[in-house]
Image: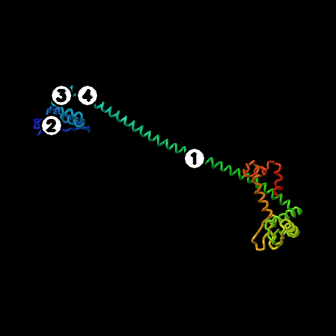
């Protein structure tokens, strides 16, 4: 701050200072009002002091103005001050514009960096989501195909089971014929005897077949001797007949119960079904036969389907 002249300081020692009385205004306006009051009372030293205070206030607020006031040696005319202030204002404005441009450039650069980083992150996230969606679509499609395949296979199996149930019913009707039942029972007994190859065996049949079995035992023993050249004693086991659920047939066992031969009708039907099941599927659904199966085993004539039950038995 500029110091007051010594004469002014001496003259203001016992002088009452000017005070502002009026509405609330800013400090700069207060200084101007006090300056005008000092002009009205023609207080020269007071005006000079107020002028110094105004200058010091301006100098403290603006660094560029403070630099100019510190370097000047003598008071310049008012026109020079105006020109310098104009130059200074232009310089400040230009400097402000340059700073603003620099700020805009740096902001744009940072914005581009942020956008580039974010766009890369968004692209990666989008690619990840696309891959995940494609994977889910593939899994869903595979799951749907599997479900339809299982449904289709279940339908095929239902058709085959229905056909086999018809075969069993037809066999039950055939077994009601006494002559046919006797022929089947004799063949089953001879087949079981040739399988067990023991000198003494026990025979189990259904209770209703006791009479037929007793009649067929000598014939079966004779046929067994002709085929093998050995003798076999067949004993009918009346204590433990076969249950009715078996559907007929015979069961042979050794006296020590170590060897059993089940030649039941239900078992024979199951074996026939297992052997011709691929052929049935080929006839009904045109399924591909396994390569290991010979071509002579493939049934291509659909008219023979009605004869399947008789052929299987």
Secondary structure state at the residue bearing disc 3: loop
Q: Nearer the viewer, mark 1 or mark 4?
A: 1
Q: CA distance from mark 2 to mark 1?
A: 86 Å
Return the disc, 4 or 2, that comes first in the chain's sequence.
2
Q: CA distance from mark 2 to mark 3?
A: 18 Å
Front disc: 3 or 4: 4
Asked if the residue under mark 3 is in contact with the one under mark 2, i.e. CB atoms within 8 Å, the reply is no
* Circle 4 residues within 10 Å: few <14, some 14–19, many ≥20: few
124 and 14: which one is in front? 124
Q: Earlier in the sequence, mark 2 or mark 3?
A: 2
Number of other residues with Cα within 10 Å of mark 2, as a class: few under 14, some 14 to 19, many 20 or more: few
Mark 2 = which residue? 3
What is the x, y in percent for residue 87?
Answer: 26, 28
Between discs 3 and 4, the one toward the N terminus: 3
* Classed neighbour count for the residue bearing mark 1: other residues with Cα under 10 Å, few (<14), some (14–19), many (≥20): few
Q: Earlier in the sequence, mark 1 or mark 4?
A: 4
Q: CA distance from mark 1 to mark 4?
A: 71 Å
In the picture, the disc for residue 76 is 3
User: Gap in Å between the C-alphas at discs 4 and 2?
Assistant: 27 Å
The tag earlier along the polypeptide, 3 or 1, is: 3
Quarter of the image where the N terminus is located = top left
Q: Which residue is mark 4?
A: 87
């Amino acid at each position: 701050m500029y110091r007051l002249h010594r004469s002014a300081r001496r003259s203001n020692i016992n002088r009452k200072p000017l005070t502002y009385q009026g509405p609330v205004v800013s400090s700069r306006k207060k200084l101007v009002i006090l300056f005008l009051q000092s002009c009205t009372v023609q207080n020269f030293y007071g005006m000079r002091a107020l002028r110094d205070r105004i200058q010091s206030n301006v100098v403290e607020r603006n660094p560029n103005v403070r630099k100019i006031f510190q370097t000047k040696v003598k008071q310049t005319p008012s026109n020079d001050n105006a020109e310098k202030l104009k130059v200074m204002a232009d310089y400040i404005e230009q400097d402000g514009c340059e700073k603003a441009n620099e700020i805009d450039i740096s902001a744009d650069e940072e914005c581009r960096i942020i956008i580039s980083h974010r766009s890369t992150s968004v692209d990666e996230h989008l690619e990840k989501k696309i891959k995940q969606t494609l994977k889910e679509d593939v899994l869903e499609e595979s799951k749907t195909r599997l479900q339809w395949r299982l449904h289709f296979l279940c339908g095929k199996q239902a058709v085959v089971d229905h056909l086999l149930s018809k075969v069993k019913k037809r066999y039950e009707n055939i077994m009601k014929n006494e002559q046919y039942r006797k022929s089947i029972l004799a063949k089953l007994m001879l087949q079981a005897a040739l399988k067990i190859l023991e000198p003494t065996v026990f025979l189990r049949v259904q209770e209703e077949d006791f009479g037929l079995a007793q009649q067929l035992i000598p014939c079966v023993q004779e046929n067994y001797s002709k085929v093998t050249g050995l003798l076999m004693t067949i004993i009918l086991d009346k204590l433990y007949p076969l249950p009715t659920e078996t559907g007929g047939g015979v069961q042979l066992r050794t006296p020590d119960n170590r060897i059993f031969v089940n030649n039941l009708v239900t078992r024979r039907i199951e074996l026939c079904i297992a052997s011709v099941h691929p052929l049935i599927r080929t006839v009904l659904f045109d399924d591909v036969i396994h390569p290991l199966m010979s071509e002579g085993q493939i049934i291509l004539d659909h008219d023979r389907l009605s004869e399947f039950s008789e052929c299987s038995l």
